[in-house]
Amino acid sequence: MFVVCKEHLELAIDRFVDEYEEAPDLVDLLETRFPDWTPPACCEEQGCEQFGRFLVV
C-alpha cells in the first residue's frame, strides 16, 4: 500500500505491480475517507513534500 502525489502515481503503480504481480486499486483520497485510518499528509516518495492524494492498494 502506498500513498503518493499525482506526480509519483505511475511510479507507485509500477512498484505495486512488480511486488504483487497484479494491478492495484487506486483510491482518490480527496473523494474517499476511512473512519479507522488517517492517511499520511505527504507523499511517501523520499524527499517529496507534496500532498499524498492517491492510495495505491
Image: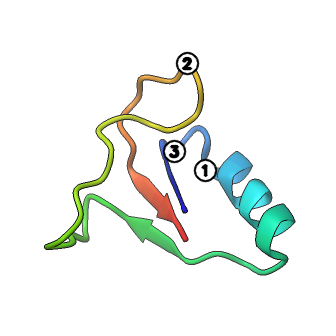
Q: Which mark is residue 9?
A: 1
Residue 50: image x %, image y %? Answer: 41, 29
**Dots 2 and 3: beta carbons under 8 Å?**
no
What mark, if any, has residue 47 been given in the picture? 2
User: Given the current orientation, which residue lies at the most extreme top position?
Assistant: 47
**Badge 3, how many Cα within 10 Å: few under 14, some, many 20+?**
some
The disc, 1 or 2, on the residue closer to the chain's N-terminal end is: 1
28 left or right of 41 in image: right
**Kind of residue at badge 1:** Leu
* Colouring mode (rainbow / by chain / secondary structure / one colour): rainbow
Q: Residue at x 14, y 73 (%)?
A: 35
Disc 1, disc 3: CB below 8 Å? yes
Marks 1/3: CA–CA distance: 5 Å
Q: Position of residue 36 (x, y in %)?
A: 18, 71
- The vertical placement of 8 against 50, above or below, is below
The residue that disc 3 covers is 6
**Can you give x and y, in whole percent of width and height, for residue 48 in the image?**
51, 24
* Secondary structure beneath label 1: helix
Inspect the image, locate mark 2, and give the three-letter code of the amino acid beneath it.
Gly
